[in-house]
Image: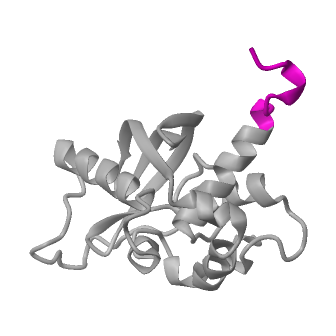
Amino acid sequence: MTPLSSRPSRLAMTVTCAALFVLVTGCSSGGGSPAGTPHHTASHSAPASPSAQPSSGPAAVTAVKNTWQSFFNGAIPIPRRLALLQDGQAFSSFVAKKEKTSLGQLVFEATATVGSVTLKPPAGASVVYTILLSGKPLAKNLHGSAVYSGGSWKISSATFCALARLAFGSKPGALPAACAS
């Protein structure tokens, strides 16, 4: 049995988990908590493309789950994962810097499972998820949000920024500029 003094603390594991999330996802904007409400929503007047994801019903729940799991899939290139994030391109330079760190190397081992999705009409969803490293939970029952924008579900910038704050603190320069609000 490992002595308590050599075990990572729950806080350290959560911070590591959040850092992994930040590095895996690489984008965000806005403020608030991970369960914060989305601050950008899709317009209902825009026509949906033939390949648009559903915005309601069981198929929308499945689409949110798939987006979340793809977001945490290290086999998917970062530019493609940035496209799964609300305002993702605003954070590409932040992700590029973090990707080159030793912690960034761990990112590609991280995955996520989704426990539940609750749709919040007209264009949002609350998500409860777990982040895993090498198949073992680092943080369970995290709360985040997704937004429906441009015909697809995206991880909310508020979710990303809340995890970035947890992982990197609020020191000047530690977070992407888009998380400043």
Whether the magenta-drawn stretch holds residue 9 is answered as yes
Instruction: Report the front residue among 3 and 15.
Output: 3
Magenta stretch, residue numbers: 1-11
Which quadrant would residue 52 be assigned to in this image? bottom left
Tell me the residue at 20%/63% (across/down): 53
Residue 33 visible? The answer is no
Q: Is residue 82 above or below residue 1?
A: below
- 87 or 174, nearer to the observer: 174
- Residue 123 falls in image quadrant: bottom left
Q: Nearer the viewer, residue 160 or 31?
A: 160
Q: Residue furthest left?
A: 50
Q: Position of residue 170 (x, y in %)?
A: 86, 62
Instruction: Give percent across and percent down for residue 155.
Output: 46, 60
Q: What colour scheme does the image use?
A: one colour
Horizontal arrangement in the rendering, residue 132 relative to residue 71 (left or right): right
- Which quarter of the rendered picture does the C terminus lie within? bottom right
- Please state the horizontal and vertical placement of residue 17, each as a whole percent of the image: 65, 47
Q: Does 101 appear in magenta?
A: no
| Residue found at the far front of this picture | 1
Taking 55 as reference, is 30 left or right? right
Q: Is residue 57 visible?
A: yes
| In front of the other: 110 or 46 | 110
- Residue drawn at 55 percent across, 53 percent down: 37
**What residue do we see at 77% from left, 72% from top?**
180
Residue 151 rendering spot, x and y as whole percentages: 26, 71
Q: Quadrant of residue 51?
A: bottom left
